[in-house]
Protein backbone atom coordinates (compact mmCIF):
# COMPACT_ATOMS: atom_id res chain seq x y z
CA UNK A 1 0.00 0.00 0.00
CA UNK A 2 2.77 2.37 0.53
CA UNK A 3 3.80 1.75 -3.02
CA UNK A 4 0.36 2.51 -4.38
CA UNK A 5 0.14 5.54 -2.14
CA UNK A 6 3.49 6.67 -3.42
CA UNK A 7 2.37 6.27 -7.08
CA UNK A 8 -0.84 8.10 -6.46
CA UNK A 9 1.04 10.89 -4.67
CA UNK A 10 3.52 11.11 -7.61
CA UNK A 11 0.60 11.20 -10.07
CA UNK A 12 -1.07 13.91 -8.01
CA UNK A 13 2.13 16.01 -8.00
CA UNK A 14 2.52 15.54 -11.75
CA UNK A 15 -1.11 16.60 -12.29
CA UNK A 16 -0.61 19.64 -10.08
CA UNK A 17 2.57 20.54 -11.92
CA UNK A 18 0.83 20.08 -15.30
CA UNK A 19 -2.18 22.13 -14.21
CA UNK A 20 0.06 24.88 -12.85
CA UNK A 21 2.15 24.89 -16.05
CA UNK A 22 -0.98 24.84 -18.28
CA UNK A 23 -2.54 27.72 -16.31
CA UNK A 24 0.66 29.71 -16.56
CA UNK A 25 0.89 29.00 -20.29
CA UNK A 26 -2.74 30.00 -20.87
CA UNK A 27 -2.42 33.18 -18.82
CA UNK A 28 0.64 34.20 -20.87
CA UNK A 29 -1.06 33.43 -24.19
CA UNK A 30 -4.32 35.14 -23.33
CA UNK A 31 -2.95 37.75 -20.95
CA UNK A 32 -3.44 41.46 -21.34
CA UNK A 33 0.25 42.21 -21.93
CA UNK A 34 0.53 39.64 -24.70
CA UNK A 35 -2.56 40.89 -26.58
CA UNK A 36 -1.52 44.55 -26.19
CA UNK A 37 1.97 43.67 -27.42
CA UNK A 38 0.53 42.02 -30.55
CA UNK A 39 -1.71 45.01 -31.19
CA UNK A 40 1.20 47.42 -30.72
CA UNK A 41 3.29 45.39 -33.13
CA UNK A 42 0.54 45.38 -35.74
CA UNK A 43 -0.12 49.11 -35.32
CA UNK A 44 3.61 49.83 -35.70
CA UNK A 45 3.68 47.82 -38.93
CA UNK A 46 0.65 49.74 -40.23
CA UNK A 47 2.28 53.06 -39.32
CA UNK A 48 5.44 52.03 -41.18
CA UNK A 49 3.39 51.12 -44.29
CA UNK A 50 1.44 54.39 -44.09
CA UNK A 51 4.69 56.36 -43.69
CA UNK A 52 6.18 54.67 -46.76
CA UNK A 53 3.04 55.39 -48.80
CA UNK A 54 2.99 59.01 -47.59
CA UNK A 55 6.65 59.51 -48.47
CA UNK A 56 6.08 58.01 -51.93
CA UNK A 57 3.03 60.23 -52.50
CA UNK A 58 4.91 63.29 -51.25
CA UNK A 59 7.75 62.56 -53.70
CA UNK A 60 5.25 62.18 -56.53
CA UNK A 61 3.59 65.48 -55.65
CA UNK A 62 6.99 67.21 -55.47
CA UNK A 63 7.95 65.80 -58.88
CA UNK A 64 4.66 66.96 -60.37
CA UNK A 65 5.10 70.41 -58.85
CA UNK A 66 8.58 70.62 -60.40
CA UNK A 67 7.16 69.46 -63.74
CA UNK A 68 4.39 72.06 -63.55
CA UNK A 69 6.94 74.76 -62.72
CA UNK A 70 8.99 73.81 -65.78
CA UNK A 71 5.82 73.86 -67.89
CA UNK A 72 4.92 77.31 -66.55
CA UNK A 73 8.44 78.61 -67.19
CA UNK A 74 8.31 77.20 -70.71
CA UNK A 75 4.90 78.77 -71.28
CA UNK A 76 6.19 82.11 -69.95
CA UNK A 77 9.17 81.95 -72.31
CA UNK A 78 6.91 81.13 -75.23
CA UNK A 79 4.55 83.96 -74.33
CA UNK A 80 7.49 86.38 -74.11
CA UNK A 81 8.74 85.21 -77.51
CA UNK A 82 5.23 85.55 -78.92
CA UNK A 83 4.92 89.06 -77.45
CA UNK A 84 8.31 90.03 -78.91
CA UNK A 85 7.30 88.68 -82.31
CA UNK A 86 3.97 90.46 -82.09
CA UNK A 87 5.84 93.68 -81.28
CA UNK A 88 8.11 93.16 -84.30
CA UNK A 89 5.12 92.53 -86.54
CA UNK A 90 3.42 95.65 -85.23
CA UNK A 91 6.59 97.70 -85.74
CA UNK A 92 6.88 96.40 -89.32
CA UNK A 93 3.21 97.17 -89.94
CA UNK A 94 3.55 100.70 -88.56
CA UNK A 95 6.74 101.19 -90.58
CA UNK A 96 4.95 100.00 -93.72
CA UNK A 97 2.03 102.31 -92.96
CA UNK A 98 4.44 105.21 -92.50
CA UNK A 99 6.18 104.48 -95.81
CA UNK A 100 2.84 104.28 -97.61
CA UNK A 101 1.72 107.60 -96.14
CA UNK A 102 5.00 109.23 -97.13
CA UNK A 103 4.67 107.84 -100.66
CA UNK A 104 1.14 109.22 -100.96
CA UNK A 105 2.18 112.63 -99.67
CA UNK A 106 5.20 112.81 -101.98
CA UNK A 107 3.02 111.80 -104.96
CA UNK A 108 0.57 114.57 -104.08
CA UNK A 109 3.40 117.11 -103.85
CA UNK A 110 4.78 116.01 -107.22
CA UNK A 111 1.32 116.39 -108.71
CA UNK A 112 1.08 119.95 -107.41
CA UNK A 113 4.57 120.84 -108.61
CA UNK A 114 3.85 119.38 -112.05
CA UNK A 115 0.92 121.78 -112.53
CA UNK A 116 2.85 124.77 -111.30
CA UNK A 117 0.02 125.55 -108.91
CA UNK A 118 1.31 126.03 -105.37
CA UNK A 119 -2.07 126.91 -103.89
CA UNK A 120 -3.81 124.49 -101.60
CA UNK A 121 -6.91 122.92 -102.98
CA UNK A 122 -10.05 124.57 -101.85
CA UNK A 123 -12.01 122.22 -99.61
CA UNK A 124 -15.47 121.28 -100.67
CA UNK A 125 -18.22 123.21 -98.98
CA UNK A 126 -19.79 121.32 -96.08
CA UNK A 127 -23.31 119.98 -96.46
CA UNK A 128 -26.07 122.32 -95.44
CA UNK A 129 -26.66 122.54 -91.71
CA UNK A 130 -23.04 121.71 -90.80
CA UNK A 131 -20.39 124.18 -89.82
CA UNK A 132 -17.18 124.32 -91.76
CA UNK A 133 -14.20 123.19 -89.73
CA UNK A 134 -11.24 125.51 -89.56
CA UNK A 135 -8.77 122.70 -90.24
CA UNK A 136 -10.30 121.12 -93.33
CA UNK A 137 -7.68 119.19 -95.30
CA UNK A 138 -7.86 118.30 -98.96
CA UNK A 139 -8.56 114.65 -99.70
CA UNK A 140 -5.59 112.92 -101.29
CA UNK A 141 -6.10 109.66 -103.11
CA UNK A 142 -3.46 106.96 -103.09
CA UNK A 143 -1.57 106.59 -106.39
CA UNK A 144 -2.07 102.84 -106.33
CA UNK A 145 -4.73 100.59 -104.96
CA UNK A 146 -4.18 99.19 -101.49
CA UNK A 147 -3.85 95.42 -101.49
CA UNK A 148 -6.10 93.54 -99.09
CA UNK A 149 -4.51 92.59 -95.81
CA UNK A 150 -3.17 89.10 -95.50
CA UNK A 151 -4.70 86.88 -92.84
CA UNK A 152 -3.03 87.09 -89.43
CA UNK A 153 0.01 84.91 -88.92
CA UNK A 154 -1.77 82.68 -86.43
CA UNK A 155 -4.57 81.93 -88.89
CA UNK A 156 -2.11 81.19 -91.69
CA UNK A 157 -0.07 78.83 -89.51
CA UNK A 158 -3.17 77.01 -88.24
CA UNK A 159 -4.59 76.71 -91.76
CA UNK A 160 -1.38 75.17 -93.09
CA UNK A 161 -1.09 72.87 -90.06
CA UNK A 162 -4.66 71.64 -90.57
CA UNK A 163 -3.77 71.00 -94.20
CA UNK A 164 -1.09 68.58 -92.95
CA UNK A 165 2.10 70.57 -93.55
CA UNK A 166 5.03 70.12 -91.15
CA UNK A 167 6.52 72.96 -89.11
CA UNK A 168 9.51 73.18 -91.49
CA UNK A 169 7.30 73.62 -94.55
CA UNK A 170 5.03 76.14 -92.81
CA UNK A 171 8.05 78.18 -91.68
CA UNK A 172 9.49 78.16 -95.22
CA UNK A 173 6.18 79.21 -96.80
CA UNK A 174 5.53 82.05 -94.37
CA UNK A 175 9.14 83.19 -94.06
CA UNK A 176 9.32 82.76 -90.29
CA UNK A 177 11.38 80.52 -88.01
CA UNK A 178 10.37 77.00 -87.06
CA UNK A 179 10.26 77.95 -83.37
CA UNK A 180 7.74 80.70 -84.17
CA UNK A 181 5.57 78.18 -85.99
CA UNK A 182 5.74 75.76 -83.06
CA UNK A 183 4.98 78.59 -80.64
CA UNK A 184 1.88 79.64 -82.57
CA UNK A 185 0.71 76.01 -82.78
CA UNK A 186 1.30 75.47 -79.05
CA UNK A 187 -0.58 78.63 -78.11
CA UNK A 188 -3.49 77.83 -80.40
CA UNK A 189 -3.81 74.37 -78.83
CA UNK A 190 -4.29 75.89 -75.37
Image: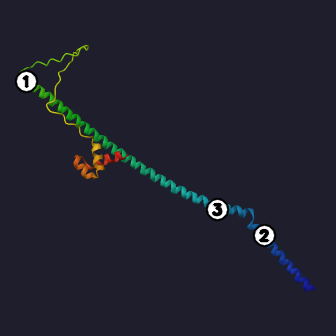
Dot 3, how many residues are within 10 Å of its Cα: few (below 14), some (14-19), or many (20+)? few
List the residue tagged with mark 3. 42
List the residue tagged with mark 1. 113
Give the distance between the C-alpha atoms of the residues marked 2 and 3, in whole angstroms: 25 Å
List the residue tagged with mark 2. 24
Query: Where, by quadrant of the figure, is residue 29 drawn?
Result: bottom right
Q: Secondary structure at mark 2?
A: helix
Q: Nearer the viewer, mark 3 or mark 1?
A: 1
Q: Specify how the rendered protein is coloured.
A: rainbow
Dots 3 and 1: beta carbons under 8 Å?
A: no
Q: Position of residue 170 (x, y in %)?
A: 25, 49
Q: Position of residue 121 (x, y in %)?
A: 13, 19
Q: Residue furthest front?
A: 128
Residue 39 versus residue 180 in the image, above or below? below
Along the line of sight, the residue nearer the viewer: 169 or 4: 169
Q: Where the N terminus falls, by quadrant? A: bottom right
Q: Position of residue 113 (x, y in %)?
A: 7, 24
Amino acid sequence: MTLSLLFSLAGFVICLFFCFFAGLYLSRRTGQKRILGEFREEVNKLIAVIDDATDRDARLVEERVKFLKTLLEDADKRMEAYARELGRVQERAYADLGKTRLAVLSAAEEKKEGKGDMRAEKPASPPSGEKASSSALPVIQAPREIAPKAAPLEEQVNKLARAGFSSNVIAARLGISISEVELVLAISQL
